[in-house]
Amino acid sequence: MALRINDIAPDFTASTTHGRIHFHSWLGDGWGILFSHPKDFTPVCTTELGALAGLQPEFDRRNVRIIGLSVDPAEDHASWLDDIEDVTGNRPEYPIIADTDLAVAKLYDMLPAGAGDSSEGRTAADNATVRAIFIIGPDRQIKLSLTYPMSTGRNFSELLRVIDSLQLTARHKVATPADWQTGEDVIILPSVPDDEAERLFPEGWVADKPYLRRVPDPS
């Protein structure tokens, strides 16, 4: 069954490059990103894992834990790290799940139930849909899900922007408009009536429309 925003992220136990983990326990009390790739030693994914490794301090600053996933074995993941560092200058320090039985990929609806139970003999094309990103909140709910084609490298700076929005809107009764960046105006939620908005935002707001009330970033 397809996973949707606000569903509880499925829990699992799996082997990784950092040893065996219990996913929900590993997440702790913070945010998490689970991102997957269809096969080790593939060109686009090599650039992606390095790009994400380069941004890890920014995710750490936001209390976001990163974990990767591939259907290949952990020893392949470990061998791949040298290539990633050589190509991108960044060596991933986050764990990478070895989903050799395809269990996590199926659990997160990245592969159909009939895909088999072994990564052996499978090509990147066989695993093309294992290119997903899930952002998971401290409540274990899925806050965002994306699936990319193999030919399009992912934009991890956009994930930072999304996380900034998610964390801001979890604390305040606001939403963020298109292309929003930290520090720019935000939108008072339509569910907040004017009398409550006056208490929350005593300096007032700009009403572009009765339903679109802008205020400065409350952070």
Image (cartoon, rainbow, N blue to C red):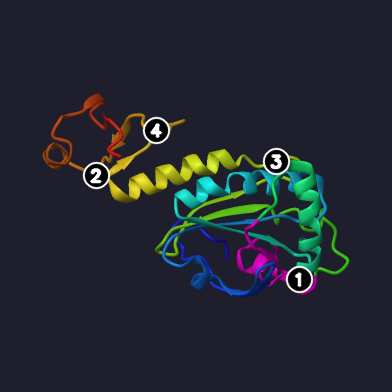
Which element carries disc 1, helix, strand or loop?
A: loop
Within the magenta stretch, is there residue 185? no
CA distance separating discs 4 and 3: 25 Å
- Taking 93 as reference, is 218 left or right? left
* Circle 4 residue: 177
Q: What residue type is labelled 2?
A: Ser
* Residue 72 relative to residue 215: left or right: right
Measured in 3D between alpha carbons, the distance from the residue under mark 4 to the one under mark 1, in whole angstroms, is 41 Å
Whole-Å distance between the Cαs marked 4 and 2? 16 Å
Frontmost of labels 4 and 1 is 1
Reading the image, the residue beneath label 3 is: 153
Q: What residue type is labelled 3?
A: Gly
Q: Marks 2 and 4: in contact by CB < 8 Å?
A: no
- Magenta stretch bounds: 93-118
- Identify which residue is drawn at 64% across, 57% down: 93
Q: Position of residue 186 (x, y in %)?
A: 32, 33
Q: Mark 2 points at which residue?
A: 191
> Is residue 109 inside the magenta stretch?
yes
Element carrying mark 3:
loop
